Amino acid sequence: MTVIILRLIFLNGDYVVTLNDIARQGANGAAMMPIIQGVGRAAIEISAVLRGAVFRGALGQAGAENVQGEQQQKLDILSDEIFLDEMRSTGFVCAVGSEEQEELLVIDEYSGADYLVLVDPLDGSSNLDIDGPVGTIFSVVKRKTEKSKCPHVSDTLQSGQSVIAAGYVLYGPALMLVCSVGAGVNGYTYNPSDARFELSHPDIRIPETGGYYSVNESNADKWLDNMGANLERLKQETGLGMRYVGAMVADMHRTLLKGGIFLYPADDKNTSGKLRLLYEAIPMGFIMEQAGGKAMSRDIGVLNIEPEALHQRVPVYFGSEKKVNILLGI
Ligand code: P6P
C-alpha cells in the first residue's frame, strides 16, 4: 500500500495501472505476471527493431523457408530470437514452441520450470514491406511432464481449455498488448513518456452489433465446408461492411473492438485451413471467448480441439456469438 501512496504523491495523484496489475487478476494472475512482463519487454524490443529496420537493411526475405514452407522475413527470425531471450529471462519458462522453429525450443537453464509458451513471433510479417500492422501472438500452458524430465513437444499438445494465459501484441500506430489470464481481457498501451505499458482498454467485450466481416474473399471460389454460401447468408442477414488487413492480429483486434467476425476457412489449397492451431487459433480464440465472443473451427469450439501436432492448421470463425451463429447456420 505504501508503494501506491508514494506513487500517488509523485505522479500528481494519478494511480496508473500497469502490467503488474495482472498479478491481482484471477487465480493465475500472480504466476502469469512475470511471463507477460517478459512478453512486454520483447514487444518493446521488437517494436524498436521494426521502426529502424529500413535503415539497417533488415526488411525483406531472409532467403530461407520456415517449417510452414513460407518465405521467412529477416525480421521473423530476429523477432523469434528476441522473444525466446525474454522468455528465458523470466526464469519461469522451460520451453517455447514457435512458428519459426520446426522443433520445440527447450530453455536449458530453466528446463525444470513450470510453463511452456507457444508463439507466433511476428504475425503478418508480409505486411512489413508496406509498413502495415503486424503482431506477436502467445499462449501459456503448464507442463505435463515431470519437472525432472526434459520438456517434450507433447507438453504443448494441450487444448485451449488448458490455456492459462494468452494474448497478442499489435505493432500499429501505438504499441499495444492485449491479454487475458482467464479473468476477462485487458488492453495495455505502451506509454513512451513512462517507458511502460499502461492500462488503456479495461475489460474489453466484443460488441454484439455492428462491426465488419473480415476474410480474404479472393479465396471464396476455393472454400470448403460450404463457406461461400454461408458468407453470402451472413452478408444478406447482417449487411456488414468488409475490412481485411491480412495480419490476423490487426483483423482480430478490430473485430474485438468494433464487433463482427473474422474468418479463415479451409480451401482446396489449405484443406485444413491456413492458421496454426497452437499459436494463432487457440490464443486468439481464448481472447475472443474471454471477451464474450465465440471461437469456432468447423463444427467444434476451437478451444475444444485436441492438438495432434505443433504446427497443425485449422479453419477459424471468430466473432460475436450472433454473427458466428448466422455464418454457421446454428
Ligand atoms: P492471406 C499472415 O501470414 C497470416 O498467417 C495471418 O496473420 C493472416 O490472417 C493470414 O495469414 C493472411 O493470409 O492468405 O489472406 O494472405
Image: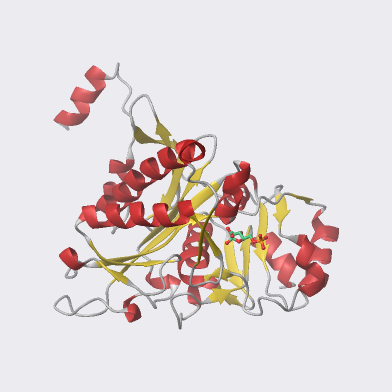
Residue visible at 27% across and 73% down in the picture: 143
Q: Quadrant of residue 187?
A: top left
Q: Which residue in the rendered view is the most extreme toward the bottom?
A: 308
- Confirm whether residue 257 shows in the render: no
Residue visible at 63% across and 43% down in the picture: 130
Q: Quadrant of residue 180?
A: bottom left
Residue visible at 29% across and 79% down in the picture: 152
- Confirm whether residue 189 shows in the render: yes
List x then y, in percent, for residue 210.
71, 47
User: Where does the N terminus fall, quadrant-wise?
Assistant: top left
Is residue 57 depicted above or below 9 in this figure? below
List x then y, in percent, for residue 197.
37, 37
Nearer to us in this view, 143 or 320: 143
In the image, taking residue 92 as reference, residue 211 lies left or right, namely right
In the image, taking residue 260 as reference, residue 48 lies left or right, namely left
Nearer to us in this view, 2 or 60: 60
Query: Which colour style is shown?
Result: secondary structure
Is residue 188 depicted above or below 90 in this figure? above
Residue visible at 48% across and 46% down in the picture: 58
In the image, taking residue 132 as reference, residue 203 lies left or right, namely left
List x then y, in percent, for residue 225.
73, 79
Q: Which residue in the rendered view is the most extreme toward the top?
A: 12
User: Where does the C terminus fall, quadrant-wise?
Assistant: bottom right
